[in-house]
Amino acid sequence: MTSELHKVQRPMKDLVKWTAILSLNLNSLLDRRLETFGINSSQFVYILKVCRSPGITRECIFREIYRNPSNISRALTQLEEKGYMTKEPSREDRRTCHLYPTKKAQETYEQIEEILSGCDQEIMEIFSEEEKEIFPGILQKAALRAVELNEKERL
């Protein structure tokens, strides 16, 4: 199986297949590595976002993270229950809440970043230097195009 993974076969025809395989296996890897913090691959991004932007609102997160708002709300509630963030109502608009990292979130932030960096390095170690330079941009471009197409179909 390993030799099959190193061969590039019909890249356009297999785009969906290989991005699904990457997503499923990377999420599984992250789930195991983040387990010690009581979080998973669908939650860590919110801890990072709140630590990087204390006081961010749910609405900002909805706009910046390409996931279903109900999934985001559920994850934020779970992280609040697990002690990773607190929410405070806005002084200007009581319907809006600002999210702040707790000490627990701040203490795990660097460790989460290290886990992500390690996964990036391990995945990319089989790439040439040129591939390492271009792959993230190509992957981002494809992902944003998928977001665009998905949003058009929802309308």
Image (cartoon, helix red, strand yellow):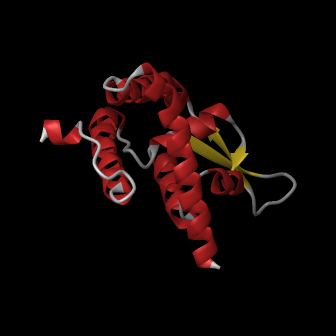
At x 48% / y 54%, what residue is drawn? Answer: 75
- Taking the image as drawn, is residue 103 in sight? yes
Q: Residue furthest front?
A: 10
At x 69% / y 36%, what residue is drawn? Answer: 54
Q: Position of residue 47 (x, y in %)?
A: 53, 39
Q: Residue furthest bottom?
A: 155
Nearest to the observer: residue 2 or residue 79:
2
Q: Which image quarter is the C terminus in?
A: bottom right
Quarter of the image for residue 7 reads top left
Q: Relative to 79, does residue 136 appear above or below in the rendering? A: above
Q: Position of residue 92 (x, y in %)?
A: 87, 55
Nearest to the observer: residue 128 or residue 149:
128
Q: Which image quarter is the N terminus in?
A: top left
- Taking the image as drawn, is residue 66 in sight? no
Q: Residue furthest right?
A: 92
Q: Position of residue 103 (x, y in %)?
A: 55, 28
Asked if residue 118 lies left or right of residue 46, the reply is left
At x 32% / y 53%, what residue is drawn? Answer: 10
Q: Relative to 99, does residue 101 appear above or below in the rendering? A: above
At x 51% / y 27%, what residue is drawn? Answer: 109
Asked if residue 105 lies left or right of residue 59, the reply is left
Q: Position of residue 151 (x, y in %)?
A: 61, 69
